Image (cartoon, coloured by chain):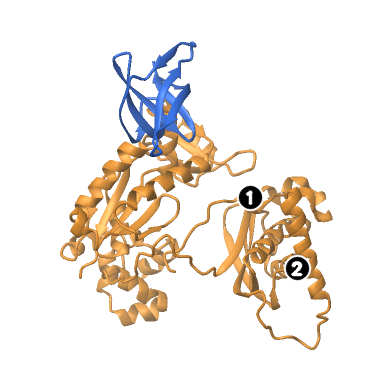
Amino acid sequence: MKKVFVQLNATFSPNGELIPVSFVWEDGSKYIIDKVYDHKKAASLKVGGQGIRYRCKVMGKEVFIFFEEGRWFVEGK
Amino acid sequence: MNRVILHCDLNNFYASVECLYNPQFRDYPLAVCGSQDLRHGIVLAKNYIAKKFGIKTGEAIWQAKQKCPNLVVVNPNYALYLRFSKEAREIYSRYSSLVESFGIDECWIDVSESTKLFGDGEKIANEIRELIKTELGVTASVGVSFNRIFAKLGSDLKKPDATTVITENNFKEMVWNLNVGELLYVGRSTRRKLNQVGIMTIGDLAGTPLSFIKRYLGKWGETLWNFANGMDYSEVIATDYQETIKGIGNSMTTARDLVNTDDVKLTFTVLAESVAERLRKHNLKGSTIQISIRDNELASIERQAKLPVPSYISGEISRKAMDIFNANWGWHKPIRSLGIRSTDLVTADTHTQLSFFEDYNKRPQLETLEFSIDAIRKRFGHYSVQRAILLKDSALNANPIEDNIIHPVSFFR
């Protein structure tokens, strides 16, 4: 598995929460994040990284998106 | 009330962080080593697989590779380690405000008051270990005890990712049969001294009459005897507590061995400039200069002498260091690293005892000059103003203030 840094669009809620909205995968296709279930600090043992982990629903599947030191990454295949 | 103190030790810290970030190396023996080009090429940390090959912290890369030819060697990334260290401290701070760092990967946490909120020490320790595992992806071993010394000892007993509880009821069974060298501040030479009089275990030390230990090792012996008997009453000091500075020093392993007095003079100039600049930054002057010399076989000596008046002038510091050096070093071996420390600090604007025999008109001029150099360097960078001597060998030049970021700390505050 590899660590894929992605271009990501996010919004700030009125009370300051950072919420990811969509991201562009390395092949250029854009994915909408349908839902953010929760977020917490976590490490990614699969690809090697540590930051705030957003548990999201993307195209019906559960995906972890990490916010690490100002950059966003997804656990790629 | 009984105290509950935790000591958290992040296992193989540098190596664990590197293994987290490089999953492809996780199943291989890995060591984090300093840069070979700068001759800092020693093992700083290793993972458990490397440990099985007998690789030890502090040995040279070539020695480690002899034991384990397919060892993965990675360079240290201090910024990353500092970030993880801070994150770990943030986790500890959820349980108590009394968190005291001991180096980059160890902390004491006083949770005596928190037990009412979160449960007993062991439960808190287990929760902390779990949080470190999930949030940081590394492991910690935690010692739980009624004093700092046994908490630290506990965290060393079971590794990795384990909790060890040492109570007032079981410490004699748990601690006393351990080798006396396991006790904090019993190093190589103290252990040898203790062994010479038949003290092999911590229990032997605890059972020896205090009067004997005091006569044998001095005041220091009493401290160690108290440690062995569980009578360490020192407190965990909160992070935000600003401790008073007792000394300012820099040391450097040079890019090549130093073989003559000119080399030493050059290196001392670099170190003295850095020490003096840091003294000025803290508005302090030092009255005593200590130097440390380590030869190329890693044997080291330390010597010190007093300055006539407290100073933060780099020229005075380097000249004094040179005097001490010339009086104490016979060049039986080339030198690998040098250090200068300034101690007996006083506030820079304090009144000092003057001497009849010196010209004090020159001092304010020299001091102003040094401040001007600070100002120029602040604006244009460290290497914008240099002493001519440093041009003789650029390999030995360095900027210790920016190159060194991690300082060891002492148990005694």
Residue pictured at 23% horizontal, 51% vertical: B124
The quadrant in which the C terminus of chain B is found is bottom left
Viewer-proximal residue among B25 and A33: A33
Q: Horizontal and vertical percent for residue B157?
A: 28, 52
In-image side of B221 versus B270 (left or right): left
> Which secondary structure lies at badge 1?
helix
**The hue in which chain B appears in the rendered picture of the protein:** orange
User: Image quarter for residue B187?
Assistant: bottom left
Residue annotated with mark 2: B319
**The hue in which chain A appears in the rendered picture of the protein:** blue
Residue B367 visible? The answer is yes
Mark 1: which amino acid?
A: Glu
Query: Disc 2 to disc 1, how far (Cα)?
Result: 23 Å
In-image side of B147 versus B17 (left or right): left
Looking at the image, is mark 2 or mark 1 nearer the viewer?
1
Viewer-proximal residue among B136 and B145: B136
- Say few, some or many: other residues with alpha carbon within 10 Å of mark 1 (under 14 / 14 to 19 / 20 or more): few
Tell me which numbered mark, 2 or 1, is placed earlier along the sequence: 2
User: Image quarter for residue A51?
Assistant: top left
Q: How many numbered marks, from 0 up?
A: 2
Q: Horizontal and vertical percent for residue B3?
A: 24, 66
